Amino acid sequence: MGTHTMGMPKKKTGIMDWLTTVDHKKIGVLYIISGLFFLLVGGVEALMIRFQLIKPMNDFVSGELFNQLITMHGTTMIFLAAMPMLIGYMNAAVPLQIGARDVAFPFLNALGFWLFFFGGVLLNLSWFFGAAPNAGWTAYAPLSTVPESLGVDFYSLGLQISGFGTLMGGINFLVTILNMRAPGMKLMRMPLFTWTAFVASALIVFAFPPLTVGLFLLTFERLFGAHFFDPAAGGNIVIWEHLFWIFGHPEVYILILPAFGIFSEIIPTFARKRLFGYTTMVFATMLIGFLGFMVWVHHMFTVGLGPVANAIFAVATMAIAVPTGVKIFNWLFTLWGGKLTFPVAMLYSVAFIPSFLVGGMTGVMLSVAPADYQYHDSYFVVAHFHYVIVGGVVFGLFAGLYYWFPLMFGKQLNEFWGKIQFWLFFIGFHLTFFPQHILGLTGMPRRVFTYLPNQGWETMNLLSSIGAAFMGVSTIVLVVSIVAALMSKEYVKRDVWGDGRTLEWTLPVPTPEYNFAQIPLVKGLDTYWLEKMAGNKTVSVSEEVGDIHMPNNSILPFVMSVGLFLAGLGFILRLDYGTVGLIIALIGLAMTLFAMFLRSWIDDEGYYIPKAEIEKDLRLEAEKEAK
Amino acid sequence: MEKHEPQLTRNQVELELKADRSREMQLQLTSFALMIFLTLIAFGAVMAELMPHWAAGGFLIIMAIVQVYLQLYMFMHMNNKGNTWIKVMMALGIFVALTIVATLRLLIW
């Protein structure tokens, strides 16, 4: 390439760098940090719930506050903790795993993050107005359409804004994975985390529109006097349930598939074996994603849709156990005969298999429609979905955190404290949720803020609350461990685990902003491992060193998101404060539109990092390796 | 012995390209005319009131499917190479939408 007129822009530093970044690695860090923050918020809510239920007739919180706590616990954990952290790992790992220099749409990526973040802030702002959403995380009409409770407005608009962000993330990763792979990275050579990220992104693209529609209906019903869910005016409350679960069930797979992907990276790494049945893993992932769209009515078995509808959806639900079972066996066969070591990431992965299996089994039990009439709305259901979401997704989040922390931050989490954290969490998790199966089978309903003594529920509730305390302590250990790691000056070397199999471990630490000085040439599945077995220290490259084209930083995604946040807040406040709210809303909308105009008007062609700079980096890296 | 491929001169390449483009243009114009014609038929069928309501409805849906096909394949270059994933995604989207609409049609309305 010749000389480029576009010079290097002035480097931004400190907070401005984080607000304007379009670098997928930094956006990944932002996602993880905010996800962890919301995980703590949701965790505190969970502890308050369990403290209230520790004994019969407890009065730690009122019934109203309890409703707000369970609503916000569910909403926060799903939308603001689990999903953003998984998208954070996708940002941190997927472009590196496929040998790309960035995602397909870096600007959109930043916009997606800030929309999620401000949506989450808007939702949690409701606490400060004394009116958190209280209609359950599912917000069933007509409970959610009672106009007096301001909280559901925060729910509908907060989720709407953060949902826009997620949708953008999904589109971005689909295009990135299809179009930005390095030479030789055929689809069937992609690491399994990339595959699951791909399928989860497709699910996001198809599942979020029904949620968007549902939330719009809810918003219009509450703020602008529409009657979609009002039977007296010809509406129908079941429409909300359908729309919510058409989104809600694929959402479960949006969460669990990337977690499956994380385990499928970690288990082969620490078993020093190729993933058993790679092809079946890929097809099982696709099949789970596909079937995930045909089972939503199993959340509505007791609505009264009739035996035919229930039977069809029950059979479809049971079918999902087949590809999931295939995956479980594949992980077991990968472990079989491997040279196993057990760092914390691997402990979580191995602990995941039996824990998730229990959740899967109770899932098949729940899918039997007639039996579901018995389990419905009891603690058995609570136990089931916490076994799949904590035992599956949260174990995955923690495993991924320990596994990729060195990649993201250049430093390692302490393994000793990590093991303590793991055991506390593992014991606490089973102690909390296993007794809830029994509580459910002995008839304790979910979503009650207290219960009477002498119904045989005291012991199990006490055990469950003690377990929650274990998980709380474990989380404190994790936070201290993260802070300590970030403060330490000990940087790790390249390929920190020593047996990295995929491309992200070939990169120097910390990863340069352009990721790959030369785009690699991929020779097969686990290409780094193949090169290692062939006696090479690093992977082959597919191009000469040259200038690298990079996107410019931009503050516009931040401005657009603040604008939408203000608009949402204004429309909510309009009900109570009238004109003031409307003015805030209009200012917010104007900000967003103006930022969109600027984005379209200004030609931003990015900049080039000159070849000399990259050669210098390569030389320094070679010197560091030689030492 | 090295086999010599017939070398295309620059002029020839340009001519081929031009011919391609004009074929493409012809196709676009033909399909455009076809689509307008099909739209007229659809309108006409309803306006002339030749059919009972249910038949007109079915006829319109068939015409709509034909139109979508023509639009996608003639106008929006879906017949070109490299569109496999777009096709897969669209098929999935249609499938999901149909499942949902069919279920809701049976269960709610």
Image: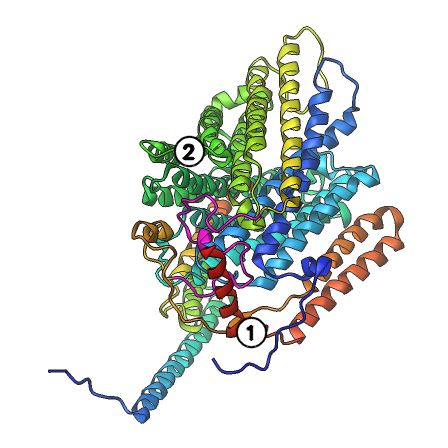
Left or right: where does residue A243 sit relative to residue B39?
right
- Label disc, if present, on residue A341 of the rendered structure: 2
> Around disc 2, counting alpha carbons within 10 Å, would you say few (fewer than 14), some (14 to 19), or many (20 or more)?
few
Amino acid type at circle 2 is Thr
Q: CA distance from mark 1 to mark 2?
A: 43 Å
State which quadrant residue A13 falls in.
Answer: bottom right
* Residue located at (44% from left, 77% from top): B32
Amino acid type at circle 1 is Tyr
Q: Which residues are magenta?
A: A491-520
The residue where tag 1 is placed is: A608
Residue nearest the viewer, comparing A75 with A607: A607
Residue nearest the viewer, comparing A37 with A127: A37
* Residue located at (48% from left, 60% from top): A623
* Residue located at (36% from left, 69% from top): B79
Q: Earlier in the sequence, mark 1 or mark 2?
A: 2
In the rendered view, tell whether residue A524 sits above or below residue A321. below
- Counting from the top left corner in percent of width and height, residue A435 is at 57, 17
* Residue located at (40% from left, 44% from top): A499
- Counting from the top left corner in percent of width and height, residue A92 is at 54, 52
Q: Are marks 1 and 2 on the same chain?
A: yes
State which quadrant residue A145 falls in.
Answer: top right
Residue A427 sits inside the magenta stretch: no
Q: Looking at the image, which residue sits at the far left?
A: B1
Residue nearest the viewer, comparing A496 with A466: A496
